[in-house]
Image (cartoon, rainbow, N blue to C red):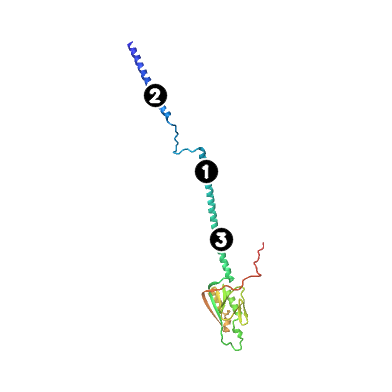
Amino acid sequence: MTSVEVGNEMKSSTNGNRKKRLSGMTLILSLALGIMLALPFKVIPRNSGEPLPSESRQELLNRMSKIEEENLLLVTELEQGRGTIASLEESLAQGEEASQGLSDQMSRYRILAGLDPVQGPGIRLTLSEHESPAIPGADIANYLIHQEDLLNIVNEIWLAGAEAIAIRSRNRTERLINTSTIRCVGSLIDVNNTRMTPPFDIFAIGDADDLYNALTMPWGVLEPLEFYNISSEIVKMDDMVLPAYSGSTILQYARQVEEAE
């Protein structure tokens, strides 16, 4: 009997201790829950900045998309501009080459037409009449320089490759072109409607050796003149300047042939 009572007393003591522990844990949990409820509720974002409203974010995306489109358009225009510049530079270079070629061709034609002064190597032929008495009974006209003499000399040096010819008498020099005239007017010789008297200096630009050989070859244009005491002196020149043709080059009737369509 005694032992049973002691067991009951031990059970009662154990139950009391458990109740005290539960009450303590309940109190602690209640306090912890109250503290948590008392703290302000806040969601901490992943980044440090404030979140943007959904509408502002969409506007920003739209703006960025528009800027990207504008940049792409500018890049396209820039590439087109570079292509245009390259094309213009190429056209300009080709135009300059064409212009230079045209300028060179025009200069050649102006030289051939005698419209510009020219410079270059060649020869100077001086023709002079001697005052020594002629053979008795001979025609005095044979001892004078005539238009035929000048024409024969000019034609010979043209054929020898002369590129420009001029005749000088006293202080007047006349450039010869395809329409030049050489004719006798009484005792004078008319060159391009300019009256000239001997001595004559005939200048020719070209290969000096070819021109010299053409004039001095046997039975050439100068040999008959020696028989009539008309002296000729040829000097090879490294450089000379011939004036431009001073006459008119206006064409009144001749015109370019029109191409058939």
Task: Answer with left or right where residue 55 lies relative to residue 19.
Answer: right
| Alpha carbons under labels 3 and 1: distance apart | 47 Å
- Observer-side mark, 1 or 2, equals 2
Of the 4 image quadrants, the one containing the C terminus is bottom right
Residue 161 shows in the view? no
- Amino acid under label 1? Arg
- Amino acid under label 2? Leu
Describe the element under mark 2 as helix, strand or loop. Answer: helix
Q: What residue would you read off at disc 3? A: 95
Q: Position of residue 176 (x, y in %)?
A: 59, 74
Describe the element under mark 3 as helix, strand or loop. Answer: helix
- Observer-side mark, 3 or 2, equals 2
Picture quadrant where residue 144 is located: bottom right
- Amino acid under label 3? Gly
Residue drawn at x 40%, y 26% is 31
Q: What residue would you read off at disc 2? A: 27
Q: Residues within 10 Å of mark 3 (few under 14, many from 20)?
A: few
- Quick one: which residue is furthest to the left in this view? 2
- Whichever of labels 3 and 2 marks the residue nearer the N terminus, that label is 2
Residue 110 shows in the view? yes
CB contact under 8 Å: marks 3 and 1: no
Q: Nearer the viewer, residue 124 or 113?
A: 113
Q: Residues within 10 Å of mark 2 (few under 14, many from 20)?
A: few
Placement of 36 over or under 147, stated as above or below: above
CB contact under 8 Å: marks 3 and 2: no
Placement of 130 over or under 20, stated as above or below: below
Q: Position of residue 168 (x, y in %)?
A: 56, 77
Q: Residue 63 bears which disc, if any?
A: 1
